[in-house]
Amino acid sequence: MHPSILSIPSILSTPSIPSIPSIPSIPSKPSKPSIQPKPFKSPKTSKTSKISKPSIPNS
């Protein structure tokens, strides 16, 4: 009974450590690039579109 109780938490403790950093690592990666390309592309496309439109008729 004594060794059985210690053995159970020991096995759960091992996968628990890598499981914790693995879970936040997955959402953290796509979450960061998802926000950056969205706002970064939005203002870039808007500026390029405005400059490109008047540039063509002006030329």
Image (cartoon, rainbow, N blue to C red):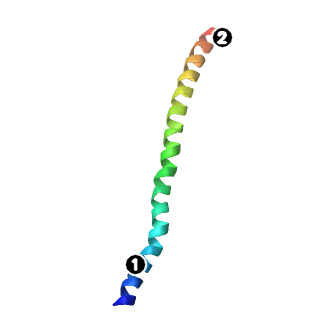
Residue at the top extreme?
58
Position of residue 7 in the picture relative to residue 46 (left or right): left
Q: How many marks?
A: 2
At 40% from the left and 83% from the top, the residue drawn is 6
Q: Above or below — where is 25 with respect to 58?
A: below
At 53% from the left and 26% from the top, the residue drawn is 43
Secondary structure at numbered mark 2: loop
Q: List x then y, in percent, for residue 53.
A: 56, 16
Between discs 1 and 2, the one toward the N terminus: 1
At 48% from the left and 46% from the top, the residue drawn is 31
Identified by mark 2, the residue type is Ser
Q: Which residue is mark 2?
A: 59
Are the two marked residues, 1 and 2, in contact with CB atoms closer than 8 angstroms? no
Identified by mark 1, the residue type is Pro
At 53% from the left and 23% from the top, the residue drawn is 46
18 or 55, which lies in front?
A: 18
Q: Which residue is mark 1?
A: 9
